[in-house]
Amino acid sequence: MQGIWFLPSLIFGGAQGFTTGNWQMFIFSVVSLGVWPLSRWFKRNRDFNLEGEVLFDGKDVFIGSHRLPRREIFWRRDWHRFVWDGLNAKSAKLVWPDLLESAAAVGFRGRTCGANWIGLDEGGQVDFELASSGPHLMIVGATGTGKSELLRLLVTGWLNQEDPIDLTLIDFKGGATMARFSTHPRVVGLATDLDATSALSIAQTLERQLDSRQHVLAESEVSDIDALWKNGGRLNRQVIVIDELGELLRQHPRLVQVLEQIASRGRSLGMHLVVTNQSMSGISRNLLVNLRARVAIGDMDPIDASQLGFRTRIQPRKDPQNWRSARLKTGAGFELEFAFPIGF
């Protein structure tokens, strides 16, 4: 819009005012001409690249050199997200290292029995209890987003739990993630893509575990492992951890039947699946429907996010160095955003 466009209406309004005494048209044209540069200034100050540091001086909020309106009602939606992420990242640089150190001191156990510390959100510590919030977990994210780091964080927490627990680790990324845990007494099996025989052997062991656990519950006349514990029975929970599920099933397609059985019957038997994958590709419907707890890491593909069941769009966030953002959806459907450490 150009200011000269107002000239005809100004001339016509002025002429009408002098000849008839009716100045409404002229006044309206003058007001419109005054609003025009104001609207251009308003638009110019609202349309700028979201770059630079977020600053708050106690009165005004700045994004780089741009001062935002003092009334948040005039803020654009993307300004809210950018400011929140920026202030949160600043706070995290100061506070999160201390919280991480505190979590590491207790072996990344959660605040309640059986829970794991998995990271932090705006409210502080985030805990995850697999048995009650799963009972199975799937972690999805592209290469380099930190899936293996989150898996390592979870395994560390389980190894330090007070409750009896056994871990079977299957690492189809060369063993780099899980090899460090191989000598721990709670690790009852370790397989990698470098040893095909070990993966098949573990599959046979898991099949036998399914049958033997069913017999134990039947003999004790209870329906699940929790009831067995209440009656004084002893049976360790078992967590089967698989890094790169898609690659495992590509090399050993017959294992899908074993994993589907664990996913469908594992809750009552005390057997829990925890898997990672780069996308939803290669995961059967029968397996997916029982992997009810999900974690999406980083900038998730919208189709994958929809298949994972997240109700809101997953957007990348700005996190402090050595932290990654993710979104958790529990088996009960509760969703939250959190950040977890890498390289801890």
Image: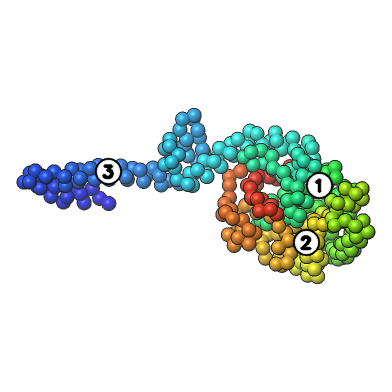
- Read off the residue under disc 1: 158
User: Who's the residue at 81% across and 59% down the image?
Assistant: 266
Q: Residues within 10 Å of mark 1 (few under 14, many from 20)?
A: many
Marks 2/3: CA distance?
64 Å
Q: Are marks 2 and 3 in contact (CB under 8 Å)?
A: no
| Camera-side mark, 2 or 3 | 2
Q: How many marks?
A: 3
The image position of residue 127, as x and y in percent, is 72, 43
How far apart are the alpha carbons under marks 1 and 2? 19 Å
In the picture of the structure, the residue carrying the numbered disc 2 is 263
Q: Position of residue 327 (x, y in %)?
A: 64, 50
The residue that appears at 70% across and 54% down in the rendered structure is: 331
- Sequence-earlier tag: 1 or 2: 1
Q: Is residue 96 left or right of residue 268?
A: left
Left or right of residue 127, residue 161 in this image = right
State how the image is colored.
Answer: rainbow
Looking at the rendered structure, the kind of residue marked 3 is Val
